[in-house]
Image (cartoon, helix red, strand yellow):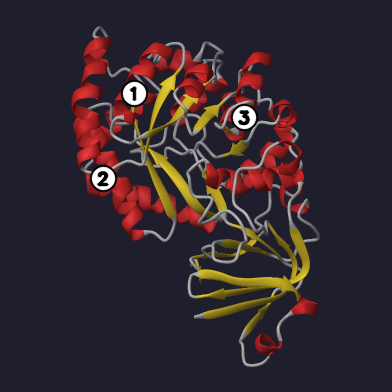
Amino acid sequence: MVRLLTHIRTLAGIREYARPLRGPELAELPQLADAWLLVENDTIAGFGRMDQLPVSLRKGTVSQDCSGRIVLPAWCDSHTHLVFARSREEEYVHKLRGLSYAEIAARGGGILHSARALEAMPEDELFIRSWERLQEAMRLGTGAIEIKSGYGLSTAAELKMLRVIRRLREKSPLHIKATFLGAHALPEAYRNDREGYLRLLETEMLPRVAAEKLADFMDVFCEQGFFTPAETDRICRAGLAYGLRPKLHVNQLSSSGGLQQALAIGALSADHLEIMTDTDIRELAASATIGTLLPTAAFFLQLPFPPARRLIEAGAAIAIASDFNPGSSPSCNMNLVVAMACMGMRLLPGEAIQAATINGAAAMELEQVTGSIRVGQRADFILTRPVPSLAYLPYAFGNNHIEQVFLAGEPVS
């Protein structure tokens, strides 16, 4: 099928190359005014200014007039926990009454609460609920997403989560990456046997995950009260033996060596980064690891926002993602994430858009297939309603600016 979009007010995110952006180049959002975009089947076949539209396309090609509208790449949400059994709004009330994330977890809430609910839910029901959430993410403009396990914390439950993710990938037009997060918390059965759970991860969970080819990456919650840097190193090395590259939770609640462990192990991304020292920032900027910032999680937990401006000025590659999960970021709305990145972390609109598209794609090793407007890349893009400018998208954050989402060249219903 051939699809021609014409008179696009702004065609944003165009490029000839695909790599993560750093420092000042993050603000340099390539764009064309009064543009056209050609899609053939599922692929971007061409684009340019309207005054340079080839004669062959002017005649005989059915076109869609996009006057006043913006086209930009679909969002690439590189950190989510979309597969879960139930919401945790009662913990939200506890937060409003002053309890901290750590205090709620110590009372049996948090991750362990989600693990108990997930273990009790049949796989088919878990898939149905997860599919509904994924549909909502698509309608909000997400074209690529990473989904973690980690609410299982037993071999059977972790495999159940990862099989649900595989079923989502088989059914959905989204690019979906699966991450094994068995080391999300210490399960209740191993409260007094940390070594036993580490051995379970190494000798039972990882071999089963690898044998069924259920994961693309692995993750560890490296934080005080969860897993230490030494334990993280041990788990990651076991995962690397099965070809699972790390994407790690670090520096959310403290700067206690998690980032350094992520860099030492060659993690694709280091995620959260609310608590960053000057040394942390310099070391991340000097590495190839992408710093994934989760502004809506910081907002929800009332934590400091990650120091995005300092990271950009130091030359780090940063992405932004939703951290969609039932406990600390119960929203898959990447449009809100972009707005929150601008308001809470002082990103410029162009920086936030590129952190949520090309850099988000790179944080999932997908930058060669999505995350930008590039000839030969899959046609995953957002068509906005008529808006005055790109800056209007995060500025008017309470409004829905999306008119249509296209994935693999087809509109999402």
- What number of labels is visible? 3
The residue shown at (52%, 17%) is: 260
In which image quadrant can residue 4 be found? Answer: bottom right
Tag 1 residue: 237
Q: Secondary structure at mark 1?
A: helix
Q: Nearer the viewer, residue 242 or 202?
A: 242
Q: Nearer the viewer, residue 375 or 409?
A: 375
Q: Earlier in the sequence, mark 2 or mark 1?
A: 2
Label 2: few (<14), some (14–19) or many (≥20) C-alpha neighbours in 10 Å? many
Residue 76 in sight from this viewpoint? yes
The reply, left or right, for residue 209 in relation to residue 355 is left
The reply, left or right, for residue 69 in relation to residue 260 is right
Q: Nearer the viewer, residue 127 or 288?
A: 288
> What's the CA distance linking mark 3 and mark 2?
31 Å
* Amino acid of disc 1: Arg
Query: Taking 171 as reference, is 279 above or below it?
Result: above
Nearer to us: label 2 or label 1: 1
Tag 3 residue: 299
Residue 103 percent coordinates (x, y):
46, 13
Query: Taking 206 as reference, is 100 above or below it?
Result: above
The residue shown at (36%, 38%) is: 84
Tag 2 residue: 163
**Contact, mark 3 vs mark 2 (Cβ under 8 Å):** no
The residue shown at (40%, 53%) is: 132
* Amino acid of disc 2: Arg
Q: Secondary structure at mark 3?
A: helix
In which image quadrant can residue 112 be found? Answer: top left
Residue 383 percent coordinates (x, y):
64, 65
Residue 249 percent coordinates (x, y):
47, 25
In which image quadrant can residue 360 be found? Answer: top right
